[in-house]
Amino acid sequence: MKYGYYPGCSLEKNARAYHESALVVAKRLGIEFEETPDWNCCGATEYFAINALAGYALVGRNLALAARQKLNGQGNQLVAPCSACFLNLSKTDHYMAESPELAEKVNSALAAGGLSYEPGSVRVRHLLDVIVDDIGYMTVAEQVRKPLYGLRVAPYYGCLVVRPDYQHIHDEPEYPLCMDGLLKVLGAEVVDYPVKTHCCGGHMTQISEETALEMIRRLLKSAADYRADVIVTLCPMCQLNLDAYQEQVNKHFGADYHIPVLYFTQLMGLAFGASPKEVGIGKEFVDARPALAKIQEEPPQNAKQKRSRPPKGALPMPSMLSHHKGGGQ
Amino acid sequence: MNHKPMEEARIGVYVCHCGTNIAKTVDVAEVARWVGEQENVVVARDYKFMCSSLGQDLIESDIKERGLTRIVVAACSPHMHEKTFRGACQRAGLNPYMFEMANIREHDSWATDDRAAATQKAKALVEGAVRRVAHHTPLEPLPVEINPNTLVVGGGIAGITTALELANAGYHVYLVEREPSIGGHMAQLDKTFPTLDCSACILTPKMVEVGQHPNITLLSYSEVEKVEGYIGNFTITVRKKARYINEELCTGCGICEEKCPKRVVDHVFEAGLGYRKVVYRPFPQAVPKYPVIDRENCTYFLRGKCRACQIFCPTKAIDFEQEDEIITFQVGNIVLATGYDLFDARRIPQYGYGRLANVFTSMEFERMVNAAGPTGGKIVLRDGVTEPKSVAIIHCVGSRDKNYHEYCSKVCCMYSLKFAHLVHERLPDAEVYNFYIDIRAPGKGYEEFYHRLLHEGTHFIRGRVAEVTDAARQPGEEGKLIVQVEDTLIGKQRRIPVDMVILSAGLEARHDSREVSQLFKMGCDFDGFFVERHPKLDPVATMTEGIFIAGCAQGPKDIPDTVAQGAAAAARVAGLIHLGTVMMEPVRAYIHEELCSGCRICNTLCPYNAIVFHEDRQVSEVITALCQGCGTCVAACPSGVISGAHFTNEQIMSQIEGVLWDVRRNGNGKQPTVNIQQSTANVQQPTVNEP
Ligand SMILES: Cc1cc2nc3c(=O)[nH]c(=O)nc-3n(C[C@H](O)[C@H](O)[C@H](O)COP(=O)(O)OP(=O)(O)OC[C@H]3O[C@@H](n4cnc5c(N)ncnc54)[C@H](O)[C@@H]3O)c2cc1C
Ligand code: SF4
Ligand code: SF4
């Protein structure tokens, strides 16, 4: 399958590991990416906050370029691995479709560069959604060579990819489960991470460090409370905040967190049998190697037994709704 | 095509203003003036309220004085007033079927603000009616006898009420209940708001009465499979599922239940909070008293071994060979009282049900506080022993929320108040927090009950809860469930740590309500609740004659309202039975025998088997008594020789020609006249092609 690919600025710099691992995984799953030629920055959050129209025009240019990529059979599907890029691209498409006035303004700006964009002509996708929905758990499972047995992972979605969910991708934007399912397929032990959609603070580190560190602390604490070995993310911003600021959180709060923060594609790559180096392990600030050393050859035995015997006299525990995307595990 | 009526038709047309409902958008005077110029129209008037007695008098006197032979009223929907105007015709000595109604309200004035377009459409609808009525023929309604037996589906408090009302009036009732016992949700409840009387104490006497009533045939653990026929004469097929218990031998002693070695979580009666045996009665007061064996979980059915129940049963009532039984019977009327399902709180994962052990649903809590429930009435956490020191009750779970159900479930505020009271009563030291959007307490004694709770010290926090989490953030949150909410009265985000959370889940339509409505050939709304004939004036009847609805199957409601509807449905049915016959529309198919080619295509198509074939004459004939007027054969006949009374080809074709008056080119030799004033709105005007 062939998709347009919009890496965005982060994947070229701080999130290189995401980029590299995404390409490894895509190759194994038979996903073909064609990078949108001459793309520009999506404007992140700042641009929209200061001058919305300029923000829309900036993103509109990327959409216009993507629309010109003629990709066989697939319509024009544009994959953005970064949550902020994904949100900005879908937001611009959505609002241009909703407001012909905005579309006209954006297009008059684009006209200066000989471009124009018709809303709806590009379908913006997040990488996670492509892997779970188009490829499916079954196909992923077939690629697993070295299951992540024994590794306790906290699935962290962040806020941008699930809300406001312009395209209604998520069954449950307030408490998504699709990455949980994916990580289970890889053999990992997925903890119930209650803050999975809470905000990492975004660029708050540049505005009010105090606030930002508290937001990051909450995320780290919850992962530690659930004894997660790794926090798994799908957004360069989240990764950066949790990883690069972990030391500062420790200093500021007198805590001692050492939780590596990896991209879901890195774990997929490892489970598919790629070497740590191939999927960019080693680029993170909080060293992931001690955590990854916990991966076992065999599925852990005790986990199952513990669950089946509730204390005597206890009331039955209800089960969660099974996640119906993607198929078997 | 040119369809000439048989005699010279003298048509009267009456255009109603409906106050301003129609007159505001349709130029009624212009419509009346214009139609007065049309062929065969002798009188054309507009009038403020045609349905008033003065309006009806107008029709009557015109018939008598001007010798009208056909009447058209352009007003509201025939569902509202066709009967009224047919009555006026009849009183003036005109056959009521020489009447036709044009709906210029629902189909026109209410659908647009564009006066010119609305007036134009009104003319088309009226002209259609005028041309149609010219071909009407006098008809006589068909009397149908009402079978005095009634089918009630669903044995909750609604169905129980209907069944008892009818049975006590001397009529026979078949009560079909899907579960092993009647009682419905009310049997699960502990106390009932606002009077706090014990639910079982007021319900079980009624259940016992149903079980013993000579006029009630109780078919529990059964489901309706097929419904045939129509008002007065329904044939019902019921599947009585195998209980694997011989009801004639079983004394209801309960020894099998005691001896059965296998227990499973009871997701129905105990709402998942407790266990039951594989051979079980949902609760001790079950009616009927016979247990059932849950085949899917029974060790004997799974592995061919066990039979403990059979070995110990003193009367040898266990019968593993029993099979489902198919029962058919006749009834005249049907009441559907299938109730509701509780909203599945797992659909809102951020509230933690299924993830966080000490989050409970409201129904679980009902079972917990019930002295006969899994904890013997003790309020405890999931571990079965620890008493909570603080309890949060979250209102509107799945209700008043566009992501789930937009409607208010009506009873959850009140039962949440009841829960708060019960916690105060059982755990006087516990703090109770109710998180609400609005407190909806409209009912006799309800607001007073709310005030009582305010005095009992419940904390009321106004705001929709964002999430329930165990991610502690501040001191005091460790090991607790934290309810994160925007308190909209103080305008602040708050985090309230508690030990126990109760989710006041809303009421939703039965998961299978759509299939059930199809089975009975009646409608259900977007949310899946059954649709009443009229939301205000006819809340228990449906659009299908002879089928009534009662209780939560029609929409969320509390027990008092449910009982009122149950009784109302019974009264409606009793009225019909008492009449003995109803008059049915004489809309029936008729085969013009002399033209029938004997191809027999219609024979097999008729869903009511109402067509017979005469071998001797090689022609088909419709048995009028069986025909339902569905029109299938009329459309199917390749020779076009079947006509549906009141829906003949002439009538339909003339109506279509009338509706198309402004685009018709050579209908009656007149040139088409299009005279609409320029409208302000930007609507596409009908264009006229020159011939
Ligand atoms: C937690 C909670 C607490 C409540 N507390 C109170 C209270 O204190 N006071 C109060 O007034 N109200 C209370 N209510 C509301 C009350 O439960 C309802 O008003 C009442 O039970 C409605 O009765 P019903 O007969 O319409 O429906 P149900 O009780 O749902 O009964 C329907 C019956 O039909 C059967 N059935 C369904 N489908 C079929 C089918 N296809 N074929 C055959 N049988 C079928 C079902 O098995 C069931 O027995 C509470 C509700 C909840 C959720
Ligand atoms: S045969 Fe089935 S129902 Fe009977 S005792 Fe054994 S498990 Fe229970
Ligand atoms: S009754 Fe109260 S709790 Fe229930 S949906 Fe309505 S407002 Fe919400």
Image: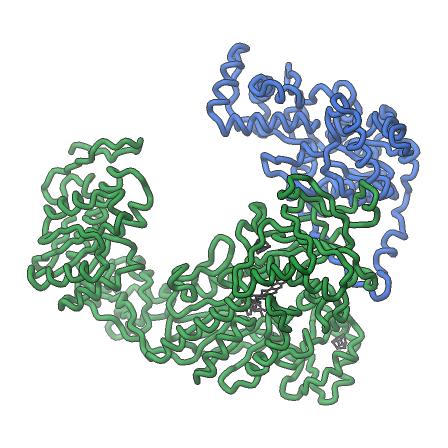
Q: Residue furthest top?
A: A112
Residue B437 image offset from top left, x and y in percent = 60, 49
Chain in green in the render: B
Please provide percent x and percent y for residue B319.
Answer: 68, 82
Colour in which the image shows chain A: blue
Image vertical order of residue B429 relative to residue B678, above or below: below
- Quadrant position of residue B178: bottom right
**Is residue A249 or residue A124 the one in the foreground?**
A249
Location of residue B509 in the rendering, given as x and y in whole percent from the top left corner: 54, 59
Q: Would you say residue A147 is visible in this rendering?
A: no
Horizontally, residue B266 falls left or right of residue A214, namely: left
Determine the residue positioned at 20% across, 55% down.
B73
Q: In the image, residue B272 lies at what x, y percent?
A: 71, 63
Question: Which quadrant is home to the C terminus of chain B?
Answer: top left
What colour scheme was applied to this rendering of the protein? by chain
Q: Is residue B248 above or below residue B465?
A: below
Q: Nearer the viewer, residue B371 or B300?
A: B371
Please determine whether, in this image, residue B604 is positioned above or below residue A164: below
Locate ligand 3 by image quadrant: bottom right
Locate residue B387: give its quadrant: bottom right
Answer with left or right where residue A98 lies relative to residue B589. Answer: right
Judge from the rendering whether residue B563 lies leftward or rightward of residue B397; answer left or right: left
